[in-house]
Image: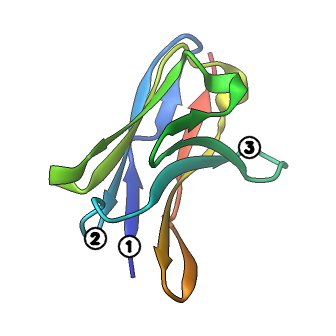
Amino acid sequence: QVQLVESGGGLVQPGGSLRLSCAASRSIFSINVMGWYRQPPGKQRELVATSGRSTNYVDSVKGRFTISRDNAKNTVYLQMNSLKPEDTAVYYCNAKVVTNLGLNDYWGQGTQVTVSS
């Protein structure tokens, strides 16, 4: 079991920056993949970035967002720069843990990011 708690969302003007944090209830060192997803208003949840053996980003955030892990703090971050109105969404932290029984997905409660002037 992994509990995830996001923080750091809020209202920001276009071109601004925010850093989201995701605190895990256990060591993330052994978690296979940590990631961030988002759900814009009226749309489906989509992948933003993942950090596992490699780091991956959706094309729309490449060069603007950076995912990082601090294993000592059991925390994953999403640094978001040059924010655009289309980045407005609820952002969710995700942990994927592979066991001998299969893949387990864990989600945080989400944090709202609103980009508007």
Q: Is residue 86 above or below residue 40?
A: above
Residue type at mark 2?
Ser
Q: Is residue 6 left or right of residue 111?
A: left
The 10 Å Cα crowd at callout 3, few under 14, some 14 to 19, many 20 or more, is some
Disc 3 is placed on an element classified as loop
Q: Quadrant of residue 40?
A: top right
Q: Are marks 1 and 2 in contact (CB under 8 Å)?
A: yes
Residue drawn at (45%, 46%) of the image: 53
Q: Amino acid at mark 3?
A: Pro
CA gap between label 2 and label 3 equals 27 Å
Write down the quadrant of residue 2 in the picture. bottom left
Percent coordinates x, y for residue 99 in the rendering: 47, 81
Q: Secondary structure at mark 2?
A: loop
At 66% from the left and 30% from the top, the residue drawn is 87
CA distance for labels 1 and 2: 5 Å
| Disc 1 residue type (three-letter) | Gln
75 to 67, vertically: above or below: below
Q: Which residue is mark 1?
A: 3
Q: Which residue is mark 3?
A: 40
Quarter placement of the N terminus:
bottom left
Tag 1 near tag 3, CB within 8 Å: no
Identify the residue shown where x is 64% and y is 46%.
38
Residue 110 percent location from the top left of the image: 53, 57
Question: Which residue is disc 2 drawn over?
Answer: 25
Query: Which label belongs to residue 83?
Result: none
